[in-house]
């Protein structure tokens, strides 16, 4: 034994095995590359004293993975001439990879039967699951113990650095490649790329083996549609909560100030705030239509696509009195073919993304030559009006969270299209909730009414709804890598997060969009999707679940796959 690998799994240990073998360490033990009945693995699983493993390890030149990470101290004593190789990685990146693989094995385990046995083997062999607290503590339910896992990871690395003499220790990040290894072992750099093996996608393919019926569910589309391009466009000015309070005449109102401060919104873009004191909602229609078109044009231009390829346009806003529709105006502005199919959907609001994408997918059918454009634009500031002490508190709640925005997206079924694939979707209307979210319009005033119980209604039964949606696809919630939740307000997000048992980092994109944009109505979930792609950088094979909540009360679910 010449090398003891002390690094945690998901730090490139399989890549290091291949690298060491290339450098001449011909036999490197790794739990993923040896038979399950190997004598060392049997000894490790039997909890035999590692100091008795000398004979079993006699033919191995290196030990990596959980065998070395768990027992590096004992193996240093057994093999006093061996060096210790501590593979490290950015802690947040490590946890992201670790959690994804835990989800994969947990998903397999939930299938039961032979699948459960396979999951236990995969988990114990590949993810250092010999120690019960890791399996039960970190993996339990929702991976909510992220900070505990990160502390454990960093504590282990610190302990190795302190326990191993510096002349016997190499700390290595696989991103550094050959140079540190070759310098440490005084070997020439090979004329070959440094190996990068067992990435997240390969791991999932290795262990997630669902039964055939579940693995190939009835396809929702013969050709899978994709969100092939996505762009956003904000109004030029963003307002602080204090500025909005003053503009709406609510400063000095203790209830309003408390709601504005606690709703999760910090700043939001608004175009018609200056008219809140002087114009009725109806009087702002012309300005609202012009604003919606201007933002739509900016979002469409940002897509950088050939509009001549678009044969169907679907536009949507929560509320519009103007005619012709936004879709007609877009066709006219870009001088598109007069035969372009165009539809405008009003009143669906925050639940819009799922039904809009469903409708476009059904419209395009299985023709890979067709491409559709969705424009979700909102002028929620057109609904904000000056408040008085006698106004309903629901009006104040809406005034605290709504913002303006626009999203444009293309949908097509071409095989080479980029972007996430739309695997399946559903729209569920909760009975007896029509009055929970509704428009209240009077001659000179109005607002979008949000009932106080909306967050609880949206979250009640959400877990069951999600599970029922995923089950025919052979999936569970643990298979979802990215949660794309509607940023309707702090309480809505908190209730959905709690119902789905999601840790904070899984819904960080939703909270971020709420803080910087507020609830922008129709395009809201597109904003969260864009932020998810930007900040989390989904890997090939990752899955995302879009969850929207809007008038009706309607819950939309859409499964995406990268």
Image (tube, rainbow, N blue to C red):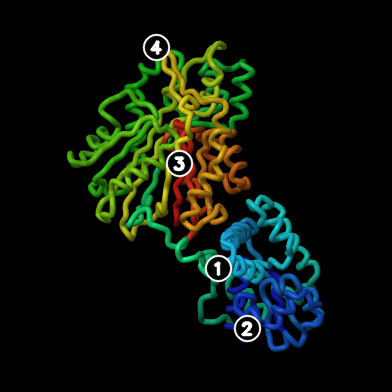
Q: Which of marks 4 and 1 is in front?
A: 1
Q: Is mark 3 on a helix, strand or loop?
A: strand
Whether the residues at callouts 3 and 2 have beta carbons within 8 Å, the answer is no
Q: Mark 4 points at which residue?
A: 443
Compared with residue 312, is residue 385 higher up or lower down, i.e. above or below? Answer: above
Q: What element carries label 4?
A: loop
Using a 10 Å C-alpha cutoff, classify the residue at mark 2 as few (fewer than 14 neighbours), some (14 to 19) or many (20 or more): few
| Lower sequence index among marks 4 and 1 | 1
Q: Residues within 10 Å of mark 4 (few under 14, many from 20)?
A: few
* Location of mark 3 (residue): 556
Residue that numbered label 2 is attached to: 187
For disc 1, the neighbor class at 10 Å (few under 14, some 14 to 19, many from 20) is: many
- Image coords of residue 561 (percent x, y): 45, 55
- Mark 3 → mark 4, Cα distance in angstroms: 33 Å
Q: Decide: marks 4, 1 in contact (CB < 8 A)? A: no
The residue tagged 1 is 207
Above or below for 414 versus 329: below
Q: Residue furthest left?
A: 338
Residue 173 seen in this snapshot: no
Classify mark 1: helix, strand or loop.
helix
* Closer to the eye: label 1 or 2: 1
Using the numbered discs, state the Cα–Cα distance from disc 1 to disc 2 in whole angstroms.
Answer: 36 Å
Q: Distance between the Cα atoms at labels 1 and 3? A: 30 Å
Q: How far apart are marks 3 and 2 (CA)?
A: 58 Å
Residue 154 in the image: above or below residue 308: below
Q: Nearer the viewer, residue 15 or 510?
A: 510
Quarter of the N terminus within the rendering: bottom right
Image point (71%, 56%), residue name: 137
Q: Where is residue 296 in the image (x, y as percent from the top left)?
A: 34, 36
């Amino acid at each position: 034994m010449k090398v003891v690998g002390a690094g945690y799994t998901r730090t490139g240990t399989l890549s290091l095995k291949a690298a060491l073998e290339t450098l001449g360490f011909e036999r490197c033990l790794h739990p993923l590359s040896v038979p399950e009945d190997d004598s060392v693995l049997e000894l490790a699983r039997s909890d035999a004293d590692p100091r008795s493993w000398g004979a079993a390890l006699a033919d191995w030149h290196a030990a990596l993975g959980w065998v070395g990470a768990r027992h590096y101290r004992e193996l240093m004593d057994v093999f006093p001439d061996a060096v210790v190789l501590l593979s490290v990685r950015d802690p947040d990146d490590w946890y992201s990879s670790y959690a994804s693989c835990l989800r994969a094995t947990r998903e397999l385990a939930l299938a039961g039967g032979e699948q459960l046995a396979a999951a236990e083997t995969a988990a114990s062999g590949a993810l250092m699951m010999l120690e019960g607290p890791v399996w039960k503590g970190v993996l339990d339910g929702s991976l909510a113990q992220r900070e505990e896992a990160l502390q454990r990871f960093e504590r282990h690395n610190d302990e190795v650095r302190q326990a191993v003499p510096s002349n016997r220790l190499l700390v290595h990040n696989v991103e550094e490649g050959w140079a540190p290894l070759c310098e440490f072992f005084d070997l020439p750099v090979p004329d070959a790329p440094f190996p990068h093996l067992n990435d997240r996608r390969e791991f999932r393919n290795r262990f997630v083996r669902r039964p055939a019926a579940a693995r190939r569910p009835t396809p929702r589309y013969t050709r899978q549609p994709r969100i092939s391009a996505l762009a956003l466009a904000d109004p030029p000015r963003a307002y602080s909560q204090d500025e909005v309070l003053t503009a709406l005449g609510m400063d000095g109102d203790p209830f309003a100030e408390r709601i504005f401060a606690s709703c999760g919104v910090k700043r939001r873009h608004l175009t018609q705030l200056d008219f809140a004191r002087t114009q009725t909602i109806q009087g702002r229609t012309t300005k609202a239509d012009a604003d919606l078109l201007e933002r739509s044009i900016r979002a469409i231009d940002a897509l950088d696509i050939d509009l001549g390829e678009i044969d169907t346009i679907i536009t949507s806003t929560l509320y519009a009195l103007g005619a012709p529709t936004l879709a007609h105006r877009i066709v006219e502005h870009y001088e598109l073919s007069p035969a372009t199919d165009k539809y405008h959907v009003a009143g669906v609001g925050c639940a819009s993304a799922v039904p809009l994408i469903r409708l476009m997918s059904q419209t395009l059918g299985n023709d890979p030559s067709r491409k559709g454009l969705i424009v979700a634009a909102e002028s929620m500031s057109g609904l904000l009006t000056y408040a008085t002490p006698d106004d309903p508190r629901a009006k104040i709640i809406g005034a605290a969270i709504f913002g303006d925005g626009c999203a444009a997206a293309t949908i097509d079924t071409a095989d080479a299209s980029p972007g996430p694939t739309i695997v399946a979707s559903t729209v569920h209307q909760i009975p007896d909730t029509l009055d929970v979210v509704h428009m209240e319009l009077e001659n000179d005033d109005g607002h979008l009414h949000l009932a106080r119980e909306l967050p609880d209604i949206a979250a009640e039964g959400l877990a069951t709804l999600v599970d029922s949606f995923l089950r025919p696809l052979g999936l569970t919630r643990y298979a979802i890598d990215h949660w794309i939740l509607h940023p309707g307000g702090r309480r809505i997000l908190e209730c959905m997060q709690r119902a789905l048992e999601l840790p904070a980092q899984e819904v960080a994109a939703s909270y971020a969009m709420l803080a910087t944009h507020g609830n922008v109505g129709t395009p809201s979930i597109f904003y969260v999707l864009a932020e998810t792609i930007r900040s989390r950088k989904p890997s090939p094979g990752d899955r995302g679940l879009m969850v929207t909540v809007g008038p009706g009360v309607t819950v939309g679910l859409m499964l995406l796959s990268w």
